[in-house]
Amino acid sequence: MERVILIRYGEIALKGENRRDFEVALKRNIEQSLKGLEGITIRRARGRFFVEGPGLERNSEADALDRLSRVPGVVSISPCRMVPNDVEQIAEAAKEIMGEFIGTNRPPVHGSLSGGLERKNAKTIAFKVASKRAWKGFPLTSPELDAKIGSFLLRTYPELVVDVHNPSVTLGIEVREDGAYLYSKEIPGPGGLPAGTAGKGVLLLSGGIDSPVAGYLAARRGIRVLALHFWSYPITSQRSRDKVVDLVRILRRYDSCIRLYVAHFTEIQTRIMEKCPEKLRVVVMRRMMMRVAEAFALKEGALCIVTGENVGQVASQTLESLRAIEEVTTLPVIRPLACFDKRETVELARKIGTYETSCLPYEDCCTVFVPRHPATKPGLEDTRAAERALDIEELVAKCVSNIEEVPID
Ligand code: ATP
Ligand code: MG
């Protein structure tokens, strides 16, 4: 009996070449995610990946499961026992798995207050067996195997009852050519596409709540994220930069290839302060960010810009503002959160683990420069006129040439 982790992956619609690319990238990303765990190998077999090896036995199974549950493209994972395709051995493995489940989920025995029937129910665990015969050479059909193993388990454990509609535990059995895989847990993964399969994108990453979530969603859609942070030292502090480093560290748990770049933005912001009308400062600043991001994207071979913008939340994110911002780039601007409610974004931020860090109070360049009454509907003509006092080309070129990559340990 061998310990194995079974990985299910998705996007059933993918065919031919696309599917192969998907699988190659997913395997590479799975390997990356398990880096540092010794004695583990990854094998692919007909629509599944398997993680196996002596390393799993040495207590690293929980760690491996935790890491795998975050890899984009993974639909779900199950820690399994693998045995040869032999009914006796399958029954033995079923006994062991259900024994473990009962051991950790033993039903409480209530005192005399509960009536007879309730008391009986409280002592039972409802289960079912769900077999899948992926290898047709196996002598029993799936319903036959379900019945055989189910009745064996009923005889073995008196606390079990069968409930095929509402079981508290399902014993899965996947019969494949190389053996049978048994499991009682199916842990959901993020789904989506393996990071990197869609090409690169530049993520505008602030220290706020939204853009890290946008970065996660982009990575989950196959985009290899190059995070670009605009930093206005000393107007904004070293701590605001460290916060972004921490955010990238968290995002790297989903895609360890995410990179962080810092663009020094102080000069551009200062010029905007000096030369542009207060009301239009924010939209001009965003346009400058877009220009720098586009030039950087072209340099790095990235195909899109990703932001955490949302329709209508603040003055700089009305449709009029978004239009004025987008005017300066020909790259697709992807806004994964465009139509989210804040509540939904916060929920996702909590789930992926960025929320707490995002809430730390260090100021961002935007917060520092936001005028009291920004234009909520900046016209294109007014905006273009507002920037005429800037030497845009020179400022952008200088900013791009000073972008530095920040190593993340
Ligand atoms: P966030 O929570 O991501 O900061 P927000 O709702 O606070 O978003 P803004 O601060 O107006 O909105 O920023 C809109 C978007 O512009 C951000 O989601 C981010 O993509 C980008 N952005 C803002 N500030 C920066 C920055 N300093 N560096 C990089 N990108 C930025
Ligand atoms: Mg912000």
Image (spheres, rainbow, N blue to C red):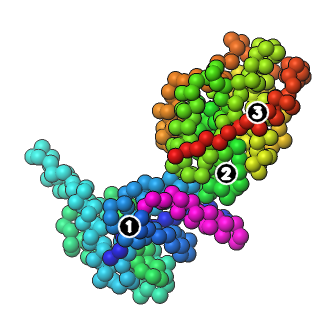
Image quarter of residue 125: bottom left
Single out the mark in the foreground, 2 or 3: 3
User: Are the residues at dot 2 and dot 3 in contact (C-beta closer than 8 Å)?
Assistant: no
Numbered label attached to residue 223: 2
Ligand 2 occupies quarter: top right
Image quarter of residue 113: top left
Depth check, front residue: 279 or 75 = 279
Marks 2 and 3 sit apart, C-alpha to C-alpha, by 24 Å
Single out the mark in the foreground, 2 or 1: 1
> Which residue is denoted by mark 3 in the rendering?
399
- Would you say the beta carbon of the disc 2 residue lies within 8 angstroms of ligand 1? no
**Which residue is found at the position 24% from the left and 71% from the top?**
154
Badge 2 element: strand
Numbered label attached to residue 69: none
- Whether residue 391 sits left or right of residue 239 in the image: it is right
User: Are the residues at dot 3 and dot 1 in contact (C-beta closer than 8 Å)?
Assistant: no
Badge 3 element: helix
- Whether residue 326 sits left or right of residue 150 in the image: it is right
Q: Amino acid at mark 3?
A: Cys
Q: Earlier along the polypeptide chain: callout 3 or callout 1?
A: 1
Numbered label attached to residue 55: 1
349 up-or-down from 238: above or below: below
Structural crowding at the residue carrying mark 2, measured as other residues with C-alpha within 10 Å and reported as few (<14), some (14–19) or many (≥20): many
Single out the mark in the foreground, 3 or 1: 3
**Which residue is found at the position 77% from the left and 37% from the top?**
400
Residue lying farthest to the left in this orientation:
112
Q: Earlier along the polypeptide chain: callout 2 or callout 3?
A: 2
Image position, residue 181 (x, y; %):
40, 73
Q: Which residues are magenta?
A: 15-37
